[in-house]
Image (cartoon, rainbow, N blue to C red):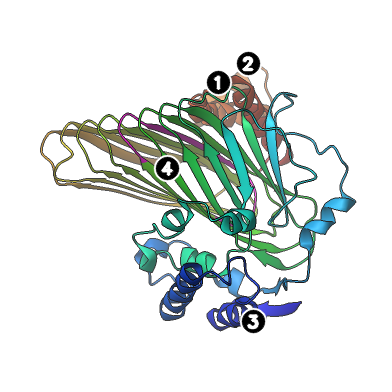
Amino acid sequence: MVTLASDKEAFIAQYDQSKGNLPGSDIAWLSELRAKNIALFEEVGLPTAKTELWKFTNLNPLKKQSFSAPSAQEQIFANSNELPRQLPRLLEINASHRLVFIDGHYSEDLSDKNLPAGVTLHNLSSAIKAGAADLKVALSSRAREEEQPLVALNTALMSDGYVLEIAKNTSVDCPIEILHLGGGKAEISYHNRNVISVGFGSKATIIEHVTDRSDHVYFSNSATEISVSENATLHHYRVQASNRAAFLYSSTEVVADKGATYDNFLLNTGARLSRTETNVSLNGENSSCHLNASYMGTDDQHCDITTRVDHKTPHTTCDEVIKGVLGGKARGVFQGKIIVHEQAQKTVGNQSHRAMLLSDRAEVDAKPELEIFADDVICSHGCTSGQIDKEQLFYLRSRGLTSEQAQALLVNAFLADAVEAVQNEDLKDLLLTKIVNWLEQNPN
C-alpha cells in the first residue's frame, strides 16, 4: 500500500509504480493507450478554476487529501466477506438483476449470476483477457481528451469496471441495478472504467446506486462509454448518495445512432464534492436524449452537473430539466452546452435549470450555452434561482401547516416535477421517497 497526496505528481508516481500490474499490462495497444493518457495528464494536470469548464468547481479540497493506492496484491473486494450475503436492493423487486462493486472492485459473489437472455457481462479484467472485439474502440473513443484530464487519469489507472452488452432485439423487462459500495477503507481512491453496448432494436433500464457503508473519505473517478444502436432505447438512472466526506467524479460518453433514445436521470444528495459529466452525441437521424436531474445539498457540499449534447444529423431532439435545492453553505453548479452542427437541420433542443436556495449562504452558478450552426431549428434555454415564494409559504401556513411542513411541501413539489420524467414507476416512487427523507433530515 502506497499513500499518496492527490496532486499531479502523486498520481503520476502511482502510475509508474502500478503500470506493470494493471489489467492488460502485457497487451501492447492498452499499454500504449495508458502511456499516452498519463502523458496527457502530466501535461494538463488536475483541472483548476483557470480552465473554463472548471471555473465554478475548485478541486483544492481534493488536493489536500492523501489517498491509498492499492497494490496488485491487495484485494480490496475481499471486504465483501464482511458484508451480509443479502445486501438491500435499491428497488425491492426480486426479479431485478444486480451487479455489485465493493470499493471499486467487482464482487462476483454478491452479484447476480443469472442475467437475462441476451445480456452478457464481464468485469474489466476478464473482458481485456478475453479480447472483446469492440473494447479497444470503446476505450480509445474519447475525442476531447485534453478537456478531460480526469478521464485521461482514469484511462491510465483503470483497474476494474464492467463491460455490459445487450444483444440486438433484446428487451430486458426488469432493471439491471449496479451497486457501487464505497468507504470500506479510509482514504482510498479507485478508477473504474465501464462500457455499455445496447444492440439494434433493444431496450433496457440500468440503475446505478452510488453509496457507502461508512463516513470515510475516498475518491471515486469513473468513466463510462455507452453506445445505443439503431432504434434502441436505454433508460439510465443514477442515485448518488455517498457520505459527505467522499469525492466523486463521473464522466459518461454516449453515442446514439439512428432512431435511438438515451434517457438519463440523476438524483444527487451525497458527497462533499461531486461532478457528473454527461456528453451525448446524436449521430443518427431521429435520435434523442433526455438529461434530467434533481440535486440537493447542505452544509458545505458542492454539486456540479455538466452536460454537452452534439446534434450532428437532422431531426434530432434533446430535453434537459435540472432542478436543485441548496441549504447551509452548499454550492450548486450547472453547465449545459447544446451544439447544433451545420447539417443538423430540424433540431429541437431545450434546456432548463432552476434552483431553490433555502439559505442566504447557499450559492448556485449556471452557465447555459447554445452554439447553433443550422438555420432551421427550435432551441431554448433558461436558468433561474431564488428563494421559496413567501406568499405560497404564507398561504400554506394559514391552512395550519408549520413553517417546516410548508417549506418541505413546497420543496418536494418543486423537485417532483423533474422526477416525473422517470418512466420506471417503482423507481419514481423511490426517488420521491428519498427526496422526502432528505427534507426531513435537513430542515435547513
Q: Is residue 123 left or right of residue 418?
A: right
Give the CA distance from mark 3 to mark 4. 33 Å
Which image quarter: residue 316?
A: top left
* Marks 3,4: beta carbons within 8 A: no
Find residue 227 and name its label.
Answer: 4
Q: Earlier in the sequence, mark 3 or mark 1?
A: 3
Amino acid type, label 2: Arg
Return the residue found at the far top: 399
Q: Earlier in the sequence, mark 4 or mark 2?
A: 4
Give the CA distance from mark 1 to mark 4. 49 Å
Q: Circle 2 is placed at which residue position?
A: 399
Crowding near the residue tagged with mark 3, few <14, some 14–19, many ≥20 C-alpha atoms within 10 Å: few
Residue occupying image coordinates x 59% and y 39%: 120
Residue 424: horizontal and vertical position, in percent? 57, 23
Element marked by disc 3: helix
Element marked by disc 1: helix
Which image quarter: residue 128?
A: bottom right
Which of the two residues, 178 or 21, is positioned nearer the viewer here?
A: 21
Q: Earlier in the sequence, mark 1 or mark 4?
A: 4
Q: Circle 3 is placed at which residue position?
A: 17
Q: Circle 1 is placed at which residue position?
A: 395
Q: Is residue 235 left or right of residue 179?
A: left
Crowding near the residue tagged with mark 2, few <14, some 14–19, many ≥20 C-alpha atoms within 10 Å: few
The residues colored magenta run 256-274
* Marks 3,2: beta carbons within 8 A: no
Amino acid type, label 1: Tyr
Amino acid type, label 4: Ser
Nearest to viewer (mark 3 / mark 1) = 3
Give the CA distance from mark 3 to mark 2. 65 Å
Residue occupying image coordinates x 38% and y 41%: 384
